Amino acid sequence: MIFYLLSSMASQKKNLQGLVAATITPMTEHGEINLSVIGQYVDYLVGKQGVKNIFVNGTTGEGLSLSISERRLLAEEWVIKGRNKLDQVVIHVGALSLKESQQLAQHAAEIGADGIAVIAPFFLKPRDKGDLIAFLREVAAAAPALPFYYYHIPALTGVKIRVEELLDGIQEQIPTFRGVKFSDTDLLDFGQCVDQYRQRQFAFLFGVDEQLLSALVMGATGAVGSTYNYLGQKTNQMLEAYERKDLSSALDHQFCIQRFINFVVKLGFGVSQNKAIMTLVSGIPMGPPRLPLQRASKEFIDKAEAKLKSLGFLSFRDLKDGNLETSS
């Protein structure tokens, strides 16, 4: 009865929709998490990028490279600094250990997060849908008052269970299930998720930033991505154009975003480079990534800066010396 009441509370929370920034974890030059800039980061997302939802401790945030205590501290700081400023703070609580994932889920509920998300365990992997559901169910049950989202990213986890298959009967197993962060380019799987389950009012959150417009056409209700930290304003312009049925303008915005992403992908683009670009655009020091990742090179940063300027993303930015610490 108690679990039913708590899961009912989860169902009353509003659906996650629109743009969701996958937050970067700021670090000091000594590789420690840097909580001191989180408040400034929140104000930047809301004021400069028009992004009011965040996804904390995911891939972009190096969540699985952090200790449990670090993940707790970051989650707390984002919730505190985001209060009355952000619409939703969703905490990724996935871990290789079920117990650790449950502890993080409980903590997210205690600090007042708006939802939790879980990645598939990827060392000792689930063999099939039943294995994966069993793991997700136990994590969700640790925070029965919070909406629960599955984080699908098969390129990194190696868990290729189709989401269309996973969604079949999932709310009977996980009453708090509210949607999926779909970080894959398989638009057949994504489209069938929407086609078959949109009547359940799930959140279909697309996670491939450069293909978002395609996903919107197929019924995406929102998007979670790393580039929304610094290209959120441009992506919001695309969303607004799409909503007013101005597909030509929406396409122009998507192509502009693609020009930048295509450029940096050819240079080598990942978590480290995202940190460097965020520092460049926002002026907030994100610091280095955690090993085994290496800093973005100076060559990458110089070329990315030039491209951002050519596309108008840095037209009025007064870059200050010392924002970027790079390797040569």
Image (cartoon, rainbow, N blue to C red):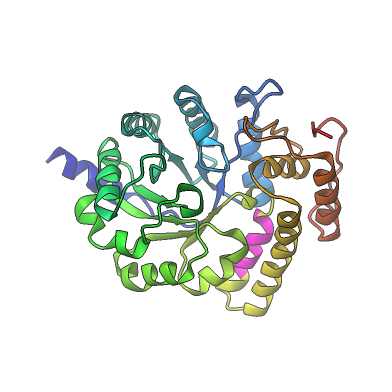
Closer-to-camera residue (207/157): 157
For image coordinates 72% across by 50% down, the residue present is 268
Residue 24: give x, y in percent of width and height: 61, 39
* Image quadrant containing the C terminus: top right
Q: Is residue 249 magenta?
A: no
Q: Is residue 307 above or below residue 289?
A: below
Q: Point out the residue furthest to the left here.
A: 1
Q: Residue at 48%, 34% (x, y): give it.
A: 79
Compared to 79, does 314 lie above or below? below
The foreground one among 47 and 304 is: 304
Magenta region, main secondary structure? helix
Residue at (40% x, 42% y) in the render: 114
Evaluate whether residue 43 shows in this view.
yes
Q: Which residues are magenta?
A: 232-240
Residue 262 against residue 107 in the figure, above or below:
below
**Residue 298 in the figure: left or right of residue 84:** right
